[in-house]
Image (cartoon, grey):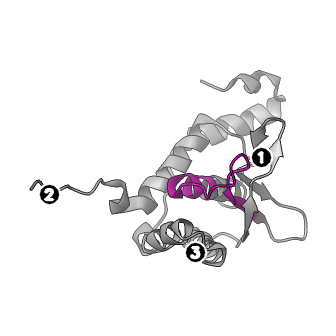
Amino acid sequence: MPFSYFDRLSASAKKVYLASDAIREVALPNAAMLQPLLPILREALLKDDHRAVSAAADALVLGITKLMRVSEVSVVVLAERPRRRGSELHGLYTVAPGRKPQIKVWMRTAQLGKVVAFKTFLRTLLHEVLHHLDYSHYKLRDSFHTSGFYSRESSLVRQLMGDMRKPTASIEP
């Protein structure tokens, strides 16, 4: 079921939307190779270490682009999220002719200035990576927020989180 804005799209944009919606999974080869980066990223966020967060996020995105055999994208981790019309901007993917694509993600909330939770940061980062994959891997003319897009995002999260998704067992005394 397309999102409500589908009806306002041109005929050619609707074709792109439907093509995007049909792709439900990202086939990330050797995702386990990148899994060791996630605890590093989580720890860097917990320590509020901007440089370590930037390095881990950059390494993760570089690893994904290499495994997917697509062009590299630069990652910029910024401090506090900007506010836009009553909401906060979590991440931004930009591409311009003749320039390397760029992902911007913010590690602090706009409202309270607190470091965002690890899973929130990871999902935001992977969301922006998926926009890059839509253009560079799937060769879509646009990158719409479709149900398929969100399924692909979840697919990436599942593959990369691996054992981190499983709750740790508690030991009864």
> Dot 2, how many residues are within 10 Å of its Cα: few (below 14), some (14-19), or many (20+)?
few
The image shows residue 102 at horizontal and vertical percentages of 78, 65
When asked about the image quadrant of residue 166, the answer is bottom left
The image shows residue 57 at horizontal and vertical percentages of 61, 70
Numbered label attached to residue 171: 2
Is the Cβ of the residue at disc 1 closer than 8 Å to that at disc 3? no
Q: Is 167 one of the magenta-colored residues?
A: no
Q: Residue at x 73, y 35 (%)?
A: 15
Q: Amino acid at mark 1?
A: Asp
Q: Earlier in the sequence, mark 1 or mark 2?
A: 1
Compared with residue 15, is residue 96 higher up or lower down, i.e. above or below? Answer: below
Secondary structure state at the residue bearing disc 3: helix
Residue 26 visible: no
Q: Amino acid at mark 2?
A: Ile
Q: Earlier in the sequence, mark 2 or mark 3?
A: 3
Q: Is 111 one of the magenta-colored residues?
A: yes
Numbered label attached to residue 142: 1
Magenta region, residue range: 103-124
Numbered label attached to residue 25: none
- For the C terminus, which image quadrant? bottom left
The image shows residue 40 at horizontal and vertical percentages of 48, 74
Compared with residue 21, is residue 75 higher up or lower down, i.e. above or below? Answer: below
Residue 75 visible: yes
Q: Residue at x 79, y 66 (%)?
A: 101
On the image, numbered disc 3 is attached to which residue? 56
Give the mark toward the camera: 1 or 3: 3
Q: Amino acid at mark 3?
A: Ala
User: In the image shown, does 80 or 14 lie closer to the viewer?
Assistant: 80
